[in-house]
Image (cartoon, rainbow, N blue to C red):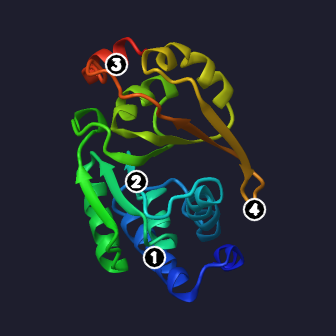
C-alpha cells in the first residue's frame, strides 16, 4: 500500500484498504467483481482513482449516492478517507450487493448504506448533495437516470477517461432537456501508470422536470 501511504492516509485507513483488497480478491474468485487482479494495480486504478475526488470537491459532511457501485468504487474508498461523508451505495446485482454488505461489515463503515436497485427507479428526487458514477454508461443516458437525484446546488460527478469531450458533445440535447448550463472538468493522472483521467462535475441549478427520468426502455431506445 505504498501509494496510499504516500497519499497521507493513517494506519487505520490503510488497514481498512488492506482488508478491502483481501475481500475483493477472495470474492473475485467466485464472482466477476473486477478484471484487475494485480494488487498494485488495484491500489492505483481502483483505490487511488476513487479517492482523488477529495482533491477537487469538498465532500465533508455531505450526502453522496454512488450509482452502479459494483465492487464499491468509488463509494467504499471515499467512506474510508472521509468519515463525515454519508454514502449510499446503489447496486442492482444481488451478488455484488452481498459483497458490499460484507465489506461494510468487516470494515465497520458506519457512514455507508447499501440499496439494491436501479437509479431510475429510486423515485426520491433531489435528495443527495453529490451523485457519482464511475464506468457507468454514456453521459446522455447517465444524466437522465441520475440527475433528478441531485439536490439543487449539488453536483453530479462522473469519473471519465479519454473520450469525455465527445460524450459531452453527444449529450448536448440532454443538457438542454435537464436544464444544465454549467459543468467543470478536472484532469488528473494516476501516479504510477500516468493514465489520464477526468472528473466531470455538473452543477444542478434547477429542479428536474417530473417527466424525467423516463422508463428505462425508452431511455435506452431513444437517449436524450
Q: Is residue 88 visible?
A: yes
Q: Nearer the viewer, residue 150 or 161?
A: 150
Q: Are there few (<14), some (14-19), or many (20+) residues within 10 Å of tag 1? A: few
Q: CA distance from mark 4 to mark 3?
A: 37 Å
Mark found first going from the N terminus, 1 or 3: 1
Secondary structure under tag 1 reads: helix
Cβ–Cβ under 8 Å for marks 2 and 4: no
Q: CA distance from mark 3 to mark 2?
A: 24 Å
Image location (x, y in percent) of residue 2? 69, 78
Secondary structure under tag 2 reads: strand
Task: Check residue 219 in the rendering and tell me which mark sits there, or answer none.
Answer: 3
Q: CA distance from mark 1 to mark 3?
A: 38 Å
Q: Quadrant of residue 23?
A: bottom left
Task: Check residue 22 in the rendering and tell me which mark sits there, or answer none.
Answer: 1
Mark found first going from the N terminus, 1 or 4: 1
Q: Is residue 99 visible?
A: no
Which residue in the protein does label 2 denote?
A: 64
Which residue in the protein does label 4 denote?
A: 191
Mark found first going from the N terminus, 1 or 2: 1
Amino acid at each position: 500500500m505504498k501509494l496510499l501511504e504516500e497519499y497521507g492516509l493513517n494506519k487505520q485507513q490503510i488497514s481498512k484498504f488492506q482488508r478491502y483488497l483481501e475481500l475483493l480478491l477472495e470474492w473475485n474468485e467466485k464472482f466477476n467483481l473486477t478484471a484487475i487482479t494485480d494488487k498494485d494495480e488495484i491500489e492505483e486504478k481502483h483505490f487511488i482513482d476513487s479517492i482523488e475526488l477529495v482533491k477537487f470537491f469538498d465532500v465533508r459532511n455531505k450526502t453522496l449516492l454512488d450509482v452502479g457501485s459494483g465492487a464499491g468504487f468509488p463509494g467504499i474508498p471515499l467512506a474510508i478517507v472521509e468519515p463525515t461523508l454519508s454514502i449510499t451505495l446503489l447496486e442492482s446485482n444481488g451478488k455484488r450487493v452481498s459483497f458490499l454488505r460484507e465489506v461494510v461489515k468487516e470494515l465497520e463503515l458506519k457512514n455507508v448504506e447499501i440499496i439494491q436497485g436501479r437509479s431510475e427507479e429510486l423515485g426520491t428526487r433531489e435528495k443527495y448533495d453529490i451523485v457519482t458514477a464511475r464506468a457507468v454508461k454514456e453521459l446522455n443516458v447517465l444524466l437522465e437516470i441520475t440527475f433528478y437525484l441531485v439536490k439543487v446546488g449539488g453536483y453530479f460527478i462522473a469519473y471519465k477517461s479519454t473520450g469525455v469531450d465527445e460524450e459531452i458533445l453527444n449529450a448536448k440535447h440532454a443538457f438542454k432537456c435537464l436544464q444544465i448550463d454549467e459543468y467543470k472538468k478536472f484532469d488528473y493522472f494516476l501516479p504510477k501508470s500516468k493514465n489520464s483521467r477526468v472528473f466531470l462535475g455538473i452543477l444542478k441549478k434547477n429542479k428536474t422536470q417530473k417527466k424525467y427520468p423516463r422508463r428505462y426502455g425508452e431511455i435506452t431506445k431513444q437517449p436524450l
